[in-house]
Image (cartoon, coloured by chain):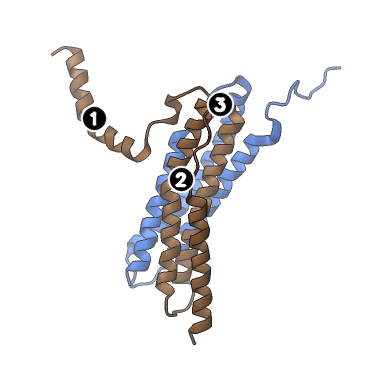
Amino acid sequence: MTPDDHDREHDDMHDRPRRAWRSIFGEDPRAVGSEPDYRFSFANERTFLAWIRTALALLAGGLGVETVLPEFGGRKELGLLLLVLGMAVAATSYRRWARNERALRTGTPLPPSNLPSLLAVGVAAVGLAAAAIILFAE
Amino acid sequence: MTSRRPDRVFDEGLQHERTALAWDRTGLAMIVAGAFLFRAWRASIPLLFVVAGGLMMAAGGMVLAVAYIRYGRLHGVLHRGGEVTNPGLVRLVGTTTVAFSVVAILRVLIP
């Protein structure tokens, strides 16, 4: 067995986790294009962090509804709606960052996203549900 | 007499500082979110949620520490020129938040 064969076997053994990793996180954005102006990279990073904080605020809100407020009808559903929204935002944030970073590196237009509108509709739904609970739960 | 001021502004627009502060705010938000799970402790509630809340608070503290170290380190990179992106750090914070959201949903679903 040559060192090359050994390497190949080693690669096969590690291929499965690597493929799973790639299916979750996609390609490393640094693999394409050239390094952009550092200010753009920082701006993209801050946007990612803003999305993460939005997710954390939704999660804290959902947990707060469930653990801080007194028992009322629809409390669990309201909490769950906030938590699912938070999870959706968190789960898409890395991919969004990587897509933006790739676009910055290759000089292509930033990809559009429908998450802001989804989030607006979701938060509005939470507000309406909370208002309905206050008005009708007597 | 020579001026003690730098000969050029190395970070116009204070992007570096604003980014470090954004990391700090995120670390603080992680601590607050973790505390919401941590303080919800009742004898009837599985220990998992208290542990997860504590871990999230610790993760937030680590983000603050990493932000501090990285802020200092990137000063050098910005002066020399070089890569400032760190996909590993971004992945870690994203994954931690998703894992936390799963535990939070379990917390609401388990009566």
Residue picked out by circle 3: A36
Residue at x 57%, y 46% (from the top left corner) = B24
Residue picked out by circle 2: A93
Contact between marks 3 and 1 (CB within 8 A): the answer is no
Chain A tint as drawn: brown
- Residue B105's place in the image compared with B94, above or below, is below
Marks 3/1: CA distance? Answer: 32 Å
Q: Earlier in the sequence, mark 1 or mark 2?
A: 1
- Establish whether labels 1 and 2 are both on one chain: yes
Quarter of the figure with residue A22: top left
- Residue B25's place in the image compared with A108, above or below, is below
Image chain in blue: B
Residue at x 17%, y 16% (from the top left corner) = A5
Marks 2/3: CA distance? Answer: 20 Å
- Residue A14 is marked as 1
Q: Residues within 10 Å of mark 2 (few under 14, many from 20)?
A: many
Which kind of residue does numbered mark 3 sit on?
A: Pro
Q: Earlier in the sequence, mark 3 or mark 1?
A: 1
Mark 1 element type: helix
Find residue A56 and report its horizontal and vertical position in percent. Answer: 49, 55
Find residue A10 and report its horizontal and vertical position in percent. Answer: 21, 24
Find residue B105 and report its horizontal and vertical position in percent. Answer: 37, 62
Badge 3: chain ID: A
Q: Is residue A81 left or right of residue B1?
A: left
